[in-house]
Amino acid sequence: MTSSTQALRNTSTIASRRIRRVVLIVACIVLAALIFGGAALATHWPFSQARVTQSLQETFPTRVSFGKFYATYFPNPGCVAENVVFRRLGRSADLPPAVTIGRMRMEARYSDLFLRPGYLARIITEGFRVEVPPIGTPLDEAGWKETPSSTRIGEIILDGSNLTVGRRSGAPLVFDIHTLKLTDVGRNKPLKYALFMNNALPTGEIRAHGEFGPWNSDDAGQTSASGEYTFDQADLGNFDGISGKLAATGKFAGVLGHLDTQGKIAIPQFMVTHSEHPVRVDSAYRAVVDGTNGDVTLQQVNPAVLKTRISAIGRIAGSAGQSGKTATVDLNVEQGRIQDVLWLFVRGKRPPFNGNTSFRAHVVIPPGDGGFLQRVRLTGDFGILGGEFAKPSTQLAVDTLSEKAQNQTASEKNADDDPDAVLTNLSGHVELTGGVANFRDFSFEVPGAWAHMHGTYNLTSTAIDLHGTLKTQSELSQMSTGFKSALLKPFNGLFKKKHAGAVLPVHLLGTYHAPEAGLDVMAAAKDAAK
């Protein structure tokens, strides 16, 4: 063996010894790290039942208990809890549990335990149930104060959850949450959410995504929130008196107590069930929502009903001692069509009256039992131009009245005249309550006559009870022919005023389908006695 070969062997042996030493040193360091890391985890293991309980009770005003709890170590550190119950504190402890969870799994990463303390990769729940007592239920949290937490969570998955909201009257509202994913959850930053759920009232499907938080424990209403949503197949039939399927899209932003929202809604077949006439309603809207109590302020709503555009503002809100919310809306129509509005409320194959209309109305719809027409209260003023009755017999009566008021026969009519006498300057003040419309200052004109009346119209039974005066160009006897005209001549002076023509006390009775117009004998007798 040559000296060079021996030198190579010696060099190789030295190198091997050095490698073994390095490997041994690294192994010792790793072993030491494992020993010290294991000891640190053993004494500061974040997933013990005691530590998890403490963390939850410092974050939420509840007392937490577990039916079963065990830690997990492989492949990831964490824990599993079953039959988890969050009970309210103080006097509120008498209420049902605030939250119950069938199974909850917390997962972390070993590297995060050392490099990102307080970070959880994931929380997954099964059978997550939240129960909210009726609004106004006194809650006593026994002086509880939130303890600031540095825990951050990569994602929380709450699929298959359920939210039940109690009501003082009626069955509770139940919201079935199909999927709910929260990401980037931490105390000092907004979390992101993605939601798919069934709404309770009106029933329908909601999809939403956006950001929420960070939570303001001192004033929940100042917690930031934003997002976009769709609301599909919302069943308006859940509300007594109306029906239809609503679809809505929109977005919102602000704080929980004041969320600015805007969007569009479409109801292909909206119907006031009494009328049995479905119509399409489309609308853009802007509103403010108080997410702490569900109150809504309508800043601008512009529904289109057939060819009539309605402008609306108002508020849907609850009040102390009241179950449910009251809707208060101010409506305005400029250059609309009265037939479009009537089509919503009256029965029959077609609207009873046609014409261009403008009106203003203040509408109040309180909660409670009874149909829509019985609950709604309306006060308004209206005007109609170019009005014509859709029913031929009713329009014929108007034509006949106009002819007689002008002392005009059918043969004397100009062939170029409109064959139908239209009602012009029809206007009035109406107050609707209990399904009965009360009219004041109800007036209209036809060629040769002017009427001023007051009375009622029952929207349910269609009963009419209107009384007033009719002024005509012709005298009383001129409004009849033959023997009847001769009999009425002595009464011309009785009903004749300063100007030519007559002023007659008249009434309109019966029903919409069978109206009875005539001389108001009682009123005439009173006038004669004066």
Image (tube, rainbow, N blue to C red):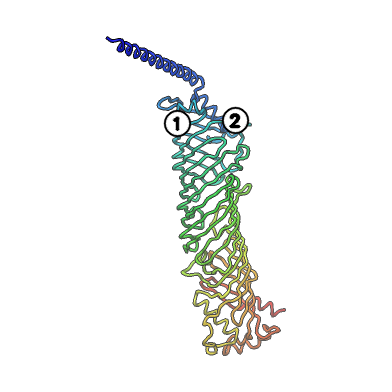
Q: Position of residue 347 (x, y in %)?
A: 49, 66
Residue 323 in view, yes or no? no
Who is closer to the viewer here, 145 or 485? Answer: 145
Residue shown at the point (44%, 32%) measured from the top left: 103
Tell me the tag on residue 270. none
User: What secondary structure is marked by label 1?
Assistant: strand
The C terminus - image quarter: bottom right
Residue 252 in view, yes or no? yes
Specify the amino acid type for callout 2: Thr
- The residue identified by callout 2 is 147
Tell me the tag on residue 105. 1
Who is closer to the viewer here, 351 or 211? Answer: 211
Q: Position of residue 57 (x, y in %)?
A: 56, 30
- Report how far apart the C-alphas of labels 1 and 2 lie in the structure: 23 Å
Q: Position of residue 436 (x, y in %)?
A: 58, 64
For label 1, the crowd category at 10 Å Cα-Cα, with few meaning under 14, some 14 to 19 and many 20 or more, is some
Who is closer to the viewer here, 166 or 222? Answer: 222
Who is closer to the viewer here, 151 or 23? Answer: 23
Q: Position of residue 502 (x, y in %)?
A: 65, 83
Say which label, 1 or 2, has the lower sequence index.
1
Residue shown at the point (55%, 82%) measured from the top left: 400
Q: Please say if the residues under marks 1 and 2 sit with CB atoms less than 8 Å apart.
A: no
Query: Does residue 37 appear left or right of residue 256 in this picture?
Result: left
The N terminus - image quarter: top left
User: What secondary structure is marked by label 2?
Assistant: loop
